[in-house]
């Protein structure tokens, strides 16, 4: 049988993507944030145990450098190197790659928008991220109000559990009739399951919800703030932005401590070893950049395909890609 060579997305969807890209560039031009391009292949990979990277081997001359290169899962590390070198506020709009992610809402290659603001924290960046999404929604005659909520308050209000102190048994009970194999799940895994299976599906469709100040154990590349809330626990200065049930963006008040970043890379390696996962090389150039001095900044990554899905009220990523993984 002859394979279907035609695009999976409608022409209207592809034209909307072009209009969105233009709107994004106008948005940042108005704010003095400069577009840059950074490498898609690098000698280092993403060590996050929950993200799998593609790799390839270069056949040409390397002058002693490794032949194996890794396709980026985000442009974060080279963008931070630019910041440390003194470039200033910048963004990149381009393709990123993640292995093992293909399905209704995932494609192994997808478009990410990532940007950084000097002198900002994650709370201030929430507002700009929401403004960009609202500008995108305006292209299709829609709007959405922004609401902020603390991670701890959200779980307490909606599920009646304290995410900082609830037992595994309490979290399993809060999942209700959702059936999950508990083998090997950590405390943070249970919290994530509650978010994806109990909380996200109930988020109002026309609301932008910014969940702020995550548990310190979910810090990723964010700074840790000592406990200052009534619950007295340390939190990661991080936010996630949802439009209805769709997660669109993940932002941080960026970690600038090279020693702490190196320790997190090492811990990622230990987790990967325990899971029998391959460990990509850590980014020594990023650590050197942090050592030289990363200015105080906040950064955020936003999934463009997810945003287009929300704009078109679709739950299939194939509806916004000219050729998704099955047609590539």
Image (cartoon, rainbow, N blue to C red):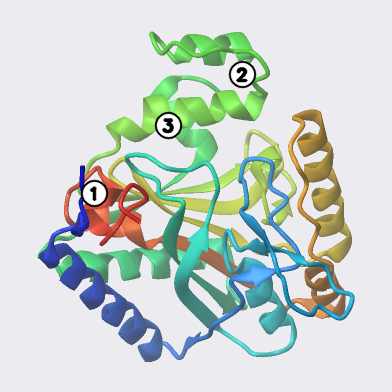
Answer with mark 3 or mark 2, whichever residue precedes in sequence: 2
Distance of mark 1 from mark 3, alpha carbons?
Answer: 35 Å
Q: Nearer the viewer, mark 3 or mark 2?
A: 3
> Which residue is pictured at 38% across the width and 25% down the height?
198
Distance of mark 3 from mark 2, alpha carbons?
Answer: 18 Å
Q: Nearer the viewer, mark 2 or mark 1?
A: 1
| On screen, residue 74 above or below 215 | below
Q: Alpha-carbon neighbours of circle 1 within 10 Å: few (<14), some, or many (≥20)? A: few
- Quarter of the rendering containing residue 205: top left
| Numbered disc 2: secondary structure | loop
| On screen, residue 59 above or below 173 | below
The residue that disc 1 covers is 3
Q: Nearer the viewer, mark 1 or mark 3?
A: 1
Question: Which quarter shows the C terminus?
Answer: bottom left
Q: Position of residue 318 (x, y in %)?
A: 27, 50
> Which residue is pictured at 65% across the width and 49% down the height?
236
Q: Position of residue 113 (x, y in %)?
A: 45, 69
Please name whichever residue, 77 or 204, is drawn nearer the observer in this view of the structure: 77
The residue that disc 2 covers is 166
| On screen, residue 112 above or below 186 | below
Residue sitting at the far front: 1
> Which residue is pictured at 19% across the width and 57% down the height?
9
| Numbered disc 1: secondary structure | loop
Asked whether residue 289 appears in the rendered view, the answer is: yes
Please name whichever residue, 143 or 47, is drawn nearer the observer in this view of the structure: 47
The residue that disc 3 covers is 196
Please name whichever residue, 317 or 164, is drawn nearer the observer in this view of the structure: 317
Answer with mark 1 or mark 3, whichever residue precedes in sequence: 1
């Amino acid at each position: 049988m002859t394979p279907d060579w035609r695009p999976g997305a409608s022409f209207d969807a592809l034209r909307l993507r072009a209009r969105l890209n233009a709107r994004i560039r106008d948005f940042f031009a108005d704010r003095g944030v400069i577009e840059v391009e950074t490498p898609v292949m690098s000698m280092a990979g993403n060590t996050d145990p929950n993200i799998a990277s593609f790799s390839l081997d270069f056949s040409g001359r390397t002058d002693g450098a490794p032949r194996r290169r890794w396709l980026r899962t985000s442009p974060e590390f080279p963008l931070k190197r630019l910041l440390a070198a003194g470039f200033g506020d910048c963004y990149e709009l381009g393709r990123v790659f993640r292995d093992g992610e293909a399905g209704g809402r995932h494609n192994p290659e997808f478009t990410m928008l990532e940007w950084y603001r000097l002198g900002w924290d994650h709370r201030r960046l929430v507002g700009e991220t929401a403004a960009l999404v609202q500008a995108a929604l305006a292209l299709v005659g829609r709007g959405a109000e922004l609401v902020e909520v603390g991670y701890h308050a959200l779980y307490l209000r909606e599920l009646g559990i304290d995410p900082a102190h609830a037992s595994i048994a309490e979290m399993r009970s809060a999942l209700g009739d959702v059936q999950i194999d508990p083998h090997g799940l950590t405390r943070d895994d249970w919290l994530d399951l509650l978010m994806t299976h109990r909380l996200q599906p109930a988020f109002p469709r026309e609301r932008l919800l910014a969940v702020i100040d995550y548990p310190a154990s979910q810090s990723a590349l964010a700074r840790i703030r000592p406990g200052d809330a009534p619950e007295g626990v340390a939190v990661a200065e991080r936010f996630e932005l949802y439009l209805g049930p769709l997660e669109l963006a993940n932002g941080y008040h960026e970690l600038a401590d090279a020693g702490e970043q190196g320790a997190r890379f090492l811990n990622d390696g230990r987790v990967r070893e325990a899971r029998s996962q391959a460990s990509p090389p850590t980014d020594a150039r990023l650590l050197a950049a942090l050592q030289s001095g990363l200015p105080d900044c906040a950064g955020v990554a936003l999934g463009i395909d997810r945003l287009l899905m929300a704009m078109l009220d679709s739950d299939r990523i194939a509806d916004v890609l000219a050729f998704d993984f099955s047609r590539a």
